Image: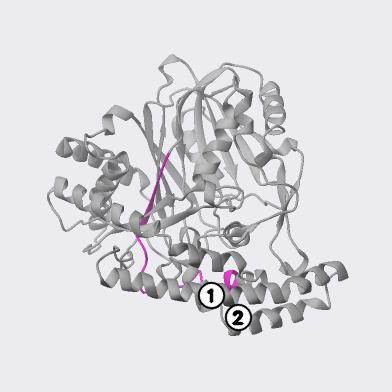
């Protein structure tokens, strides 16, 4: 695995961070046994769906992807007390609180049949599926391509568009900010640079020494053989990254590069602690794409502006003093230039709730988002990525295991997540039933307990909410505030 992917893999043992992609199809009535057989047959032709993770003894090196076959328990059909939308959302809430073990199978398909009142169900009952994936296997963009390969029934070539890992392909480390949501870790490359010099070499050597006596000779020999190479690369690349950081700072001071994202104080919806035992809730707001289109604005900016309204009103309604709000927005990087399956940066975006006029607020959000993207794409950041890629596995593993998830930091990179991915044309089907819409639920993190997914498919856009039930007990109230804010924002911007 790459370092980014291994981070996601190891972090999943401490907090839920799986991906959940929801697709709603028309239910054609085809027997479930046939649907299961289709999934088994199709997944066998998709490289990303026929691997699992294999750990190195003692975590002396990063895990590897090895081949595995489809197992019957990867297709799970759920029976609801009542086949309606309310029961479906409750059941999906329970599903998103679970996690797959990538060392056994890194994905699972949840199936709900005969849903009578799903959005767009005027033409008949719906078949809703939730594709659950380990975050080590894919980021949001790659996961959408995997789902498209699985549900594109008519185009077998689709299964060949998703890259697969060859057996023993090494995994890489992940952007900690997306999983931990803590400002101090919002750029894990900084931590890598700080640990890069000789002190890191000593730490790693000690961690290796503690494991040597208990591990198989071959695993130990391979790990020890790579030790001097990894230490040299870490030190050399750490020095180059230090120089790159200094140059970035100089460009920022000279006004040639936008500054990094701001810090924010935490709020009522930001409480630290592991998410493995939390009760999860989801809601979906399904819209025609035309309802959210505003000339000169992206759907992402429209939704961010609506979230700024709804979240401020919700927090004030609960008696909270709200002066500033921010959001983390994942941004995909060039897939062709990366070996990792997770290839994105999280951008910290001010929501400017102190600006009362919505057109000006949207302008400021759009400008800030553009600045964050410009900085995130600067070539100098590649030097820092190269350090992360060679950080010794035991050192990264130790940092993940020791990170204090139950501590509220002084400042955070954002109060919520707004993750936006367009999943392509609505030309998918399952069991002969055409697709109606798609949704998705960014993981509730160790500090961010409310997240938003914005997912387009054809001429629909779905805003999905995912929340910790203890922190946001009245998710329906927030969903109604967001519905109203979407209408108000679009009306104001038009």
Query: Looking at the rendering, which quadrant does residue 3 occupy?
Result: bottom right
Q: Which dot marks residue 226?
A: none
The answer to whether 290 appears left or right of 145 in the picture is: left
Q: Secondary structure at mark 2?
A: helix
The answer to whether 316 appears left or right of 426 in the picture is: left
Q: Residue at x 53, y 51 (%)?
A: 337
Mark 1 and mark 2 in contact? Answer it, CB < 8 Å: yes
Please report the bounds of the magenta region as a residue range. 399-421
**Can see residue 422?**
yes
- Farthest-out residue, left: 357
Q: Which residue is mark 2?
A: 200
**Can see residue 79?**
no
Q: Which residue is mark 1?
A: 238
Q: Residue at x 68, y 63 (%)?
A: 62
The answer to whether 100 appears left or right of 315 in the picture is: right
Mark 1 surroundings within 10 Å by alpha-carbon count, few (fewer than 14), some (14 through 19), many (20 or more):
many
């Amino acid at each position: 695995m790459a370092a980014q992917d291994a981070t996601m893999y190891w972090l999943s043992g401490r907090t839920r961070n799986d991906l959940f992609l929801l697709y709603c199809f028309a239910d054609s009535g085809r027997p479930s046994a046939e649907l299961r057989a289709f999934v088994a047959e199709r997944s066998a032709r998709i490289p990303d769906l026929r691997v699992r993770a294999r750990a190195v003894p003692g975590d002396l090196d990063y895990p590897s992807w090895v081949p595995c076959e489809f197992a019957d328990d990867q297709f799970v059909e759920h029976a609801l007390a009542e086949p309606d939308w309310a029961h479906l959302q409750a059941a999906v809430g329970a599903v998103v609180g679970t996690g797959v073990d990538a060392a056994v199978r890194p994905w699972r398909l949840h199936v709900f049949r005969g849903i009578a009142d799903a959005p767009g169900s005027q033409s008949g009952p719906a078949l809703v599926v939730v594709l659950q994936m380990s975050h080590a296997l894919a980021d949001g963009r790659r996961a959408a391509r995997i789902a498209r390969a699985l549900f594109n029934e008519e185009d077998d070539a689709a299964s060949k568009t998703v890259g697969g890992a060859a057996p023993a392909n090494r995994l890489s480390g992940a952007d900690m900010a997306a999983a931990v949501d803590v400002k101090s870790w919002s750029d894990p490359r900084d931590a890598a640079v700080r640990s890069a010099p000789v002190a890191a070499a000593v730490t790693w050597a000690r961690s290796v020494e503690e494991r040597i006596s208990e591990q198989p000779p071959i695993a130990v020999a391979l790990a020890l053989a790579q030790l001097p190479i990894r230490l040299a690369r870490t030190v050399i690349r750490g020095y180059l990254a230090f120089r790159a950081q200094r140059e970035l700072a100089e460009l920022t001071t000279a006004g040639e590069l936008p500054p990094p994202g701001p810090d924010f104080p935490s709020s009522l919806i930001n409480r630290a602690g592991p998410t493995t035992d939390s009760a999860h809730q989801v809601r979906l707001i399904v819209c025609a794409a035309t309802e959210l289109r505003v000339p000169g604005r992206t759907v992402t900016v429209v939704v961010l502006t609506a979230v700024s309204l709804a979240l401020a009103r919700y927090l004030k309604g609960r008696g909270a003093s709200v002066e500033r709000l921010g959001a983390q927005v994942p941004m995909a990087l060039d897939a062709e230039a990366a070996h990792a399956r997770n290839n994105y940066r999280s951008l910290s975006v001010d929501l400017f709730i102190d600006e009362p006029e919505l057109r000006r607020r949207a302008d400021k959000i759009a400008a800030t988002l553009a600045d964050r993207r410009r900085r995130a794409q600067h070539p100098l950041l590649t030097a820092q990525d190269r350090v992360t890629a060679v950080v010794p596995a035991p050192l990264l593993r130790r940092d993940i295991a020791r990170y204090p998830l139950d501590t509220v930091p002084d400042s955070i990179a954002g109060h919520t997540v707004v993750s936006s991915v367009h999943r392509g044309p609505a030309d998918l089907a399952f069991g002969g039933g055409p697709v109606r819409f798609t949704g998705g639920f960014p993981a509730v993190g160790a500090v961010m307990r409310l997240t938003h997914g914005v997912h387009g498919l054809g001429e629909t856009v779905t805003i999905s909410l995912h929340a910790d039930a203890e922190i946001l007990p009245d998710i329906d109230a927030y969903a109604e505030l967001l519905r109203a804010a979407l209408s108000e924002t679009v009306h104001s911007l038009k």
